[in-house]
Image (tube, rainbow, N blue to C red):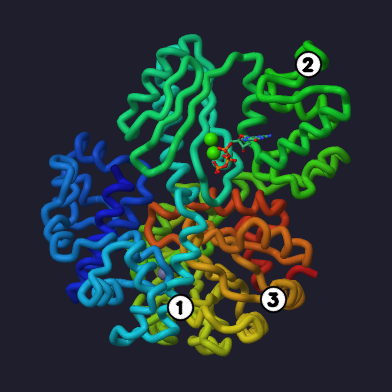
């Protein structure tokens, strides 16, 4: 229920914003972020522990808790319905398009009765947008580009959403009597940033029962096919899922086959053929005799390869180095010692510094870096020099009170159009570490954009570039950058590149991580959390790093606190030499 509810709250925030209501939109947005990232379902929280427990969710006050209660009880929220009646538009669809916000949606609806992305595309193609107040041809083109970009990823689901959905289904399947094992395969097991459908594999002594239960899960919207050993369903979340029940002796080969990628499988099959074998989802065969199938590792070994993590299986060189037994040892889940990009209620986060620190401690971190926005990002209430100094004093105080976690003083300094920073060097010098990021002027030319970022990297106080390409998966294209130059300068100046782990960032992403590593660039994996719940997102960044073949030593926040501080003390150009 969390995802549904988060979607409603996001929509209410946008609808209230359109009406020009103050403050409330931010409250709904914060609650949406918080609910979206919760482990426990709000329905369970409410049914087990009542409305009081709902109020304890960060970013959820009394008013919002009552609406959650209303939704659990009645499946709808009256205020939401009322808002929708006034403005019956597909808010989440429209706002997902780059350049389209609440104000624009309002104008589009009032002037042209545009309700959906389809309506919008039609109007833009007909040149009807440019004449609207404050629109113009440039915005019309931008919107059209946004629509096209989104079409490319239509029908796919973000990894964060897909993973939490899949985990729930796996738990459900594991609890069915007779089920011995359940695994997710496909793009999800490879931690690809977007997922087309979910592929589940199971071993069970009672396949029929598993199929019955699978097709009648509460999440199922419709059933495409129900067979003895294979079923396919449509889930309410808007994605399809397959389940196959297998015998022990072919589970490994099925897991290998259905994990893919397809290109990786085709390359493997060629190797098998060369050796005189046959490879398919039922096993590796010599003639009619099965020589491997029970275990995935065995398949690779019999083909003369080392086993490799699913994240690497893209047929982009991994097979060749597995044949030479030279696979890298990838950074692993559990290797990180802390999180160095987090926002608090000092800017646009939902929680206090203390709450964030205590949650980081609970997660087993040694340190947490607080990096609130700066004044260039005015809508977040970002800090100027003075406010940042006050925050630093507050963190010093907290560090004296709290044990078991070190709070590091940082900032997410805003990069201006020409690469200027909005905090003075004097104050930057006082922070434990400094990140900076681009949040505006996304449409500059490659030359201008590259120059802009290089200028920021050349500042001796800037330790790290946060979400370097500013892209948003399935929503916003990356800014144009000359990555060879960027990574060269990053390596020369000792500027760290972030792997932003937030599932709606993943920036740098796999391919760029692999490229940057070749230049000797170092990385940090951070959550970009804006609430305590989002501090759990590190795993998505680790997965991207693994997809980018990064090793533990490439990632700065695998260092324990003491080593990290020693590193940060050195002048940045000498850190990695
Ligand atoms: P998705 O669902 O689009 O995010 O991507 P996948 O990789 O999960 O693809 P899916 O669900 O169509 O199929 C799961 C796996 O099954 C795929 O990764 C590799 C394997 N597979 C599917 N079709 C073929 C095929 O035509 N040839 C080979 N060799 N393998 C295939
Ligand atoms: Ca799939
Ligand atoms: Ca599939
Ligand atoms: Zn923020």
**Residue at the disc numbered 3:** 482
Mark-to-mark CA distance, 3 and 1: 24 Å
Which residue is at a point 61% across and 53% down the rendered structure image?
A: 544
Q: Ligand 4 falls in which quarter?
A: bottom left
Under tag 2, what secondary structure? strand
Mark nearer the viewer, 3 or 1? 1
**Quick one: quadrant of the C terminus?**
bottom right
Relative to 40, 71 lies left or right: left
Say which quarter of the image contains residue 291: top right
Q: Of label 2 and label 1, which has the lower sequence position?
A: 1
**Quick one: quadrant of the N terminus?**
top left
**Residue at the disc numbered 1:** 141
- Point out residue 502 in the picture as x, y percentages from the top left corner: 49, 57
- Point out residue 345 in the picture as x, y percentages from the top left corner: 34, 68
Under tag 3, what secondary structure? loop
Give the class, few, some or many, for how many residues have Cα within 10 Å of label 2's Cα (few <14, many ≥20): some
Mark-to-mark CA distance, 2 and 3: 49 Å
Q: Are marks 3 and 1 in contact (CB under 8 Å)?
A: no
Q: Of label 3 and label 1, which has the lower sequence position?
A: 1
Relative to 147, 68 lies left or right: left
- Point out residue 16 in the picture as x, y percentages from the top left corner: 20, 68
Cβ of disc 2 within 8 Å of ligand 1? no
Mark-to-mark CA distance, 2 and 1: 58 Å
Q: Is residue 43 visible?
A: yes
Q: Is residue 86 above or below residue 126?
A: above
Q: Is residue 426 visible?
A: no
Say which quarter of the image contains residue 53: top left
Which dot marks residue 291? 2
């Amino acid at each position: 229920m969390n995802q549904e509810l988060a979607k409603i709250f996001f929509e209410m925030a946008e609808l209230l914003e359109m009406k020009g209501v103050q403050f409330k939109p931010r409250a709904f947005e914060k609650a949406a972020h918080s609910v979206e990232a919760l482990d426990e379902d709000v329905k369970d929280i409410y049914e087990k522990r009542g409305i009081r427990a709902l109020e304890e969710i960060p970013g959820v006050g009394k008013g919002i808790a009552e609406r959650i209660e209303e939704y659990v009880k009645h499946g709808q929220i009256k205020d939401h319905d009322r808002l929708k009646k006034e403005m019956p538009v597909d808010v989440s669809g429209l706002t997902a398009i780059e350049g389209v916000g609440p104000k624009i949606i309002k104008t589009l609806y009032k002037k042209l009765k545009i309700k959906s992305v389809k309506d919008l595309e039609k109007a833009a193609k007909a040149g009807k947008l440019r004449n609207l107040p404050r629109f113009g041809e440039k915005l019309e083109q931008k919107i059209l580009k946004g629509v096209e970009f989104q079409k490319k990823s239509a029908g796919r689901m973000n990894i964060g959403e897909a993973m939490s959905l899949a985990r729930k289904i796996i738990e459900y399947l594991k609890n069915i009597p007779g089920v011995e094992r359940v695994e997710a395969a496909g793009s999800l097991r490879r931690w690809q940033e977007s997922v087309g459908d979910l592929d589940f594999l199971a071993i069970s002594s009672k396949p029929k029962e598993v199929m019955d239960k699978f097709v009648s899960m509460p999440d199922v919207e419709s059933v495409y096919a129900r067979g003895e050993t294979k079923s396919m369903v449509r889930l309410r979340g808007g994605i399809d899922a397959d389940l196959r029940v297998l015998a022990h002796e072919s589970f490994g080969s099925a897991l290998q086959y259905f994990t893919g990628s397809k290109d990786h499988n085709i390359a493997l099959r060629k190797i098998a053929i060369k050796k005189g074998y046959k490879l398919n989802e039922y096993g590796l065969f010599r003639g009619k005799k099965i020589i491997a199938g029970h275990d995935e590792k065995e398949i690779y070994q019999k083909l003369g390869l080392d086993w490799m993590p699913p994240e690497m299986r893209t047929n982009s060189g991994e097979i060749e180095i597995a044949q030479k037994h030279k696979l890298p040892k990838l950074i692993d889940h559990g290797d990180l010692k802390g999180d160095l990009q987090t926002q608090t209620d000092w800017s646009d986060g939902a929680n206090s510094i203390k709450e964030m620190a205590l949650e980081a401690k609970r997660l087993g971190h040694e340190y947490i870096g607080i990096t609130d926005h700066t004044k260039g990002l005015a809508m977040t209430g970002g800090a100027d020099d003075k406010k940042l100094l006050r925050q630093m004093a507050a963190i010093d105080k907290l560090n004296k009170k709290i044990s078991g976690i070190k709070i590091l003083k940082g900032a997410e300094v805003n990069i201006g159009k020409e690469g200027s920073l909005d905090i003075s060097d004097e104050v930057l010098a006082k922070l434990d570490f400094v990140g900076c990021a681009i949040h505006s002027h996304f449409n500059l030319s490659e030359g201008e954009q590259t120059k802009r970022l290089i200028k920021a990297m050349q500042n001796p106080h800037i330790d790290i570039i946060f979400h370097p390409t500013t892209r948003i998966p399935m929503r916003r294209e990356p800014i144009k950058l000359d990555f060879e130059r960027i990574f060269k300068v990053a390596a020369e100046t000792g500027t760290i590149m972030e792997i932003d782990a937030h599932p709606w960032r993943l920036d740098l992403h796999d391919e760029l991580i692999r490229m940057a590593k070749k230049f000797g660039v170092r990385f940090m994996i951070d959550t970009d959390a804006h609430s305590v719940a989002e501090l759990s997102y590190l795993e998505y960044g680790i997965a991207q790093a693994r997809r980018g073949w990064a090793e533990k030593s490439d990632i700065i926040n695998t260092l324990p606190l003491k080593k990290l501080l020693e590193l940060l003390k050195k002048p940045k150009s000498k850190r990695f030499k």
